[in-house]
Image (cartoon, grey):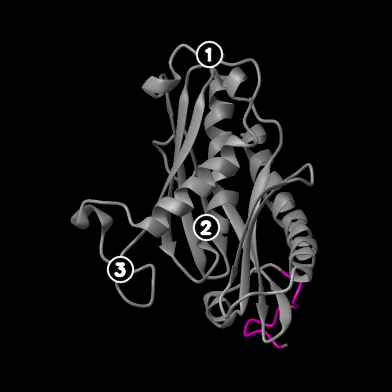
């Protein structure tokens, strides 16, 4: 199947991660995957939620939102409606779970890191791009605690990225654009670690049930994409150590 941007079926979109994109956040990144752009900002607080106090462990969570004109037509602001949309709640919980899976919460101490993920432009794969970019923002925020002598080391066990896979016209494709996602019969969202582990799989049969063999095919393709994204992510993090 010929893809509109000329990619092979097993290629991720051109991806760049700019570290320290915001001046005032403890950690921040701008991730661009094709035409999808997500701004991630990590805020470090010297406290934990009330239910977490006294446990000696930290907490990492995320919030997710889309700018009104990040999409083809205007999307209303959540602040006007006064509540977070169900889809956005689901996505921010996914991002939070992915980040917590790689953080040593005991070594973090009773601190909270909140990562805001704001979609500036959406062309498919916003939740998976947010995971990949959020990790870089998180790393910078934690690295700052080490630089300031607050922590002895960065309390991370490994890295985590997100990537999508979909079955479009009977062919499995890696890292779907919006056009491809719209036409997909089955779509998957993965969170994977640099240790080769799966954190989460979200799978939906848009046209009905699908055979289980597709899951194995999707996992293999996602792992291939994760290798590419982990290297881009690693290079972004290395710039912090050189600054």
Lateral position of residue 174 relative to residue 29, left or right: right
Q: Exactly how many numbered labels are in the figure?
A: 3
Q: Which residue lies under the disc numbered 3?
A: 75
CA distance for labels 1 and 2? 30 Å
Verify whether residue 199 appears in magenta: no
**Magenta segment boundaries in residue numbering:** 2-11
Residue name at image x 76 percent, y 61 percent:
219
Secondary structure beneath disc 3?
Answer: loop
Specify few, some or many for label 1: CA neighbours under 10 Å numbering under 14, 14-19, or 20 or more. Answer: some
**Is residue 200 or residue 236 the one in the foreground?**
200
**Quadrant occupied by the C terminus:** top right
In this rendering, which labeled residue sits more in front, label 3 or label 1?
A: 1
Q: Which mark, residue 127?
A: 2
Image location (x, y in percent) of residue 95: 53, 47
Seen in the picture, residue 172 relative to 152 is either above or below; the reply is below
Image spot of residue 148 (x, y percent): 53, 18
Gap between marks 3 and 2 measured at Cα: 17 Å
- Tell me where residue 184 sits by quadrant: bottom right
Q: Confirm or deny contact between disc 3 and disc 1 (CB under 8 A).
A: no
Q: Looking at the image, which residue is at 79% across and 47% down?
A: 196
Q: Which residue is found at the position 56% from the left and 57% from the top?
A: 129
Between the residue at mark 3 and the residue at mark 1, the CA separation in whole angstroms equals 41 Å
Q: Nearer the viewer, residue 212 or 51?
A: 212
Is tag 3's residue or tag 1's residue first in the polypeptide sequence?
1
Task: Locate the N terminus by quadrant.
Answer: bottom right
Whether residue 6 appears in magenta in the rendering, the answer is yes
Q: Which mark is residue 30?
A: none
Q: Position of residue 79 (x, y in %)?
A: 23, 53
Q: Which residue is mark 1?
A: 56
């Amino acid at each position: 199947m010929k893809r509109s941007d000329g990619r092979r079926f097993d290629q991720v979109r051109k991806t760049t991660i700019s570290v320290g994109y915001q001046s005032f956040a403890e950690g921040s990144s701008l991730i661009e995957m094709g035409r999808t752009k997500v701004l991630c900002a990590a805020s470090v607080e010297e406290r934990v939620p009330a239910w977490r106090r006294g446990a000696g462990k930290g907490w990492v969570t995320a919030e997710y939102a889309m700018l009104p004109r990040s999409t083809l037509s205007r999307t209303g602001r959540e602040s006007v409606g006064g509540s977070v949309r169900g889809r956005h709640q689901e996505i921010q919980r996914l991002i939070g779970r992915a980040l917590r899976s790689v953080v040593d919460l005991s070594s973090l101490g009773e601190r909270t890191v909140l990562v805001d993920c704001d979609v500036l432009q959406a062309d498919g794969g916003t939740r998976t791009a947010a995971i990949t970019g959020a990790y870089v923002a998180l790393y910078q925020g934690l690295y700052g605690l080490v630089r300031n002598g607050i922590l002895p080391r960065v309390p991370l066990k490994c890295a985590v990225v997100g990537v999508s896979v979909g079955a479009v016209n009977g062919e499995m494709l890696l890292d779907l654009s919006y056009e491809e996602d719209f036409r997909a019969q089955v779509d998957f969202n993965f969170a994977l670690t640099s240790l080769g582990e799966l954190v989460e799989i979200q799978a939906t049969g848009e046209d009905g049930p699908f055979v289980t063999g597709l899951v194995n095919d999707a996992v293999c393709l996602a792992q291939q994409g994760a290798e590419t994204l982990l290297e881009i992510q690693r290079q972004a993090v290395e710039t912090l150590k050189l600054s």
